[in-house]
Image (cartoon, grey):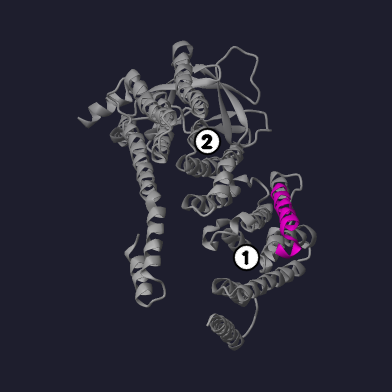
Amino acid sequence: MKITYLFIIFIIIAIAQIFVPIQMTMDNEDVIDSGVAYKFKTRPIDPTDPFRGKYITLRYEINHFNTSDTTYVVGEEIYVYIRNDNKGFAEVHNVSKEPLDVKEDYVKTRVTYYYKGKVSFQLPFNTFYMEETKAYDAEMAYNRANRDSLPNNIYALVYIKEDSAVLKDVYIDDVPIQEFVDTYKN
Amino acid sequence: MNSKFNKELQELVRNQVISSEIADRISQYYDTKNVSKPNQLFTIFGVFGALLVGSGIILMLAHNWDDFSKITKTILAFIPLLIGQCFVGFSILKNKSKTWKESSGTFLFFAVGTSISLVSQIYNISGDLGAFLQVWIALCLPLVYVLRSHAVALLVVLFSTYYALEVGVWEYRSDKTPWMYLVFVLAIVPHYWLQLKNNTSSNATSIFNWAIPISIATSLVTFISKDEELGFVMYITLFGLFYTIGRLTVFNKIRILKNGYLILGSLGTIILLMIFTFRWPWKELFNTWDYNSQEFYITIALGGIAIGGIGYAIVKQGVRAISLFQLTFLIFWILFFGLSQIESLPMILTNLLIFVLGIVMIRNGVNTFNFSILNYGLLIISILIICRFFDTNMSFVMRGILFVMVGIGFFLTNYRMLKKQQKKESNQQKIIS
């Protein structure tokens, strides 16, 4: 009898253990399916995560906004409102401490620095996982692509829907970074 | 049974201390007692195997195979999880041995981590390692009770500490406090308490006796956010609480070395107090602090529990059972909160307090004929004297003389105790013969 109870409890735990990754998958798929795609200009660098393996960190050009509000504090949660500029890349057009009553896409993040009206922040989708052998090459490929001095040649494709943002891919000269690294290596 | 023990038995028989019949019975007794040992070894190997396989799978998947499609990666994320769950389910349903339960639990622990991290990889979910660890621990914690698994409990303690440090210290520009750490540790307590009550002197319990206080002492730093001055008070209160826990009757049966609370409590209290025997912390550190701060409330909470523990000990064992070490944090509270505006007085009183603590230890060592305790007491006083060398303008001759005196003190006290012990032993032998 006791074993049956234990087993039932275990089944509940097992369902929870399966439910969490499934829920994560479904939430992210939903953002990719029905969210709005934005291109964020960026540059990659190459660190490691002990559990999740190699990734590249993306440093976005969008990292600050000039505001007249002087009450921002480091670590405070903020809403960064995004729209496309005339070249088809994402740009910030407003930053707010509270969600605004407008139908515009936003990204939730935290203030990293504030000085004389300039609110600095880090966009949260700054991690892009890559095969371990490719992460370093990606950084090298980026450096080479950057020397080409083509404007807007590297960007991240991000889907945004409500509170969620999913980083779909990173492109160098409009080629996905994995493919770009492969051609760069050969 | 080990060969050294057999040789000892043979020697006792040869010297006619015991008969060969008794030697046989002793030998048989230990043989039957040790039957469970191979199982234990099996469990340890099983857990290590699961640990290696589990972390191996994590490492392999961390390679981030680009050639696999999103669907393949997603399926891969669930395979180790389902295998682990099947093993655990089987162990429970068939009520398998401890080896099975411990190993399958350990494997499932890592499988859960693997599945969440692979989904994080697929969708490039960003850096928040703290949130990832939190979900991982929460999903595996119930396994401790379903499987009664020490290995999973230990993994939970270990990863909770990692979570606390990640959220509270390592995370870039973090101003968060890892409150969930408290939930995780409190959730382990019933398992630990049962183990402590039923298998007080087992090796697993000893590991927990060290792992839990080390984890708590390490994680406490993550609960300090703004009032760093109060951090010292938090720590000294925690060490006082540890000491009180270490003196609970349940720990009387085990050796001091297996009692992490007592050793950490005592060492922590002495080391922190040693800092406050100098003038500079009183002069520079304690200018202002906020009574309405997280640190103050945590200090009060820890102190409340420690005072509760002392009260319990007084009711159960009487006032005489209370040691000065248990009350040290309260004395420090008075010095810190009441007298820190005056620089010299709390400094002098802290010096005096350590001196008295050293004397108490020496006395305890002498009374119980325990050389370790005696020398620990001597060490406390010696370090106190050495520390005073740094901030006094004594001449080198004077310092030299003091050193020699401390050295002679060490020698004489140990020598006297040795003599006393020998005398006691010879008296006992006389009584026996």
Work out whether residue B8 or residue B269 is closer to the camera in this orientation and state it.
B8
Q: Residues within 10 Å of mark 1 (few under 14, many from 20)?
A: many
Q: Which image quadrant: the N terminus of chain B? A: bottom left
Please tell me whether mark 2 sits on a helix, a strand or a loop.
helix
Work out whether mark 1 precedes mark 2 in sequence or the reverse, and give the earlier one: 2
Name the spot of residue B283 as percent of width and height, x first: 71, 64
Q: Provide the residue designation for mark 2.
A: B145
Circle 1 SS class: helix
The quadrant in which residue B84 appears is top left
Q: How far from the left and from the top, in percent, is residue A157? A: 41, 20
Asked if residue A148 lies in the magenta stretch, the reply is: no
Q: Main secondary structure of the magenta part?
A: helix
- The residue under label 1 is B270
Three-letter code, disc 2? Tyr
Callout 2: residue from which chain?
A: B
Residue range in magenta is B301-321
Q: Amino acid at mark 1?
A: Ile
Relative to B140, say whether B123 is above or below.
above
